Amino acid sequence: MTPAEVGDDAYLLDVREPDEWTAGHAPGAHHLPMMEIPARMAEVPTDREVVVVCRSGGRSGQVVSYLMGNGWDNVRNLDGGMQSWAFAGREVVSENGQQAQVL
């Protein structure tokens, strides 16, 4: 799915590492690092569209496959990750007071 296809009501699940999240993420996104997914799957909604994002789309693609293999049918990968999100002009915010950037 492209950044332009992500609706305002989508649950954006950012699976990047904490330093990547702090430097810049989509507003309203939910942070759940990839390695914590198996222990925290219950936090991933099953009743609405979930768009999984990482830096470039690789890790998020793995998370989408993992979740689908465990019964989720509402998860999609953000093509190109946060890099394509920022390139498309979608808003990026930081958690550290610095100018937001995609690491």
Image: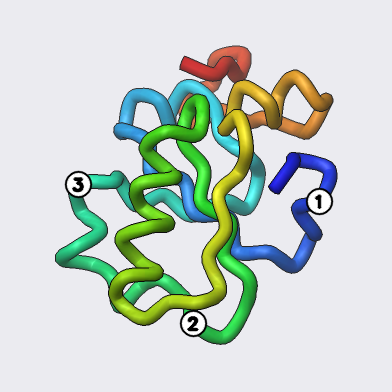
- Nearer to me, 4 or 94: 4
Quick check: 17 above or below 50?
above
Q: CA distance from mark 3 to mark 2?
A: 20 Å
What secondary structure is found at the residue carrying circle 3? helix
Residue found farthest to the left: 39
Of the image marks 3 and 2, the number of the one nearer the N terminus: 3
Look at mark 1 in the image and give the residue it sits on: 5
Q: Residue 68, relative to residue 81: is it above or below?
A: below
Seen in the picture, residue 57 relative to 41 is either above or below; the reply is: above
Q: Is residue 15 left or right of residue 102?
A: left
Q: Which mark is residue 35?
A: 3
Disc 2 and disc 1: Cα gap in Å? 19 Å
Whether pointer 3 and pointer 2 mark residues with C-beta atoms closer than 8 Å, the reply is no
| Residue in view at x 60 percent, y 29 percent | 80
Q: Label 2 crowding class (10 Å Cα cut-off): few <14, some 14-19, many 20+?
A: few
Residue type beneath disc 1: Glu
Q: Residues within 10 Å of mark 1 (few under 14, many from 20)?
A: few
- Which residue is at a point 36% across and 52% down the rendered structure image? 63
Q: CA distance from mark 1 to mark 3?
A: 27 Å
> Residue 56 location, x and y as percent?
51, 26
Position in image of residue 67 (x %, y %): 35, 66
Q: Secondary structure at mark 1?
A: helix
Q: Amino acid at mark 2?
A: Thr
Q: Quadrant of residue 94?
A: top right
Asked if the residues shown at circle 1 and circle 3 are in contact, with their CB atoms under 8 angstroms apart, the answer is: no
Q: Earlier in the sequence, mark 1 or mark 3?
A: 1
Direction from residue 99 to residue 67 in the image, left or right? left
Numbered mark located on residue 62 in the image: none
Q: Amino acid at mark 3?
A: Met
- Furthest residue to the bottom? 47
List the residue tagged with mark 2: 46
Task: Give the percent coordinates (x, y) of residue 39.
Answer: 15, 66
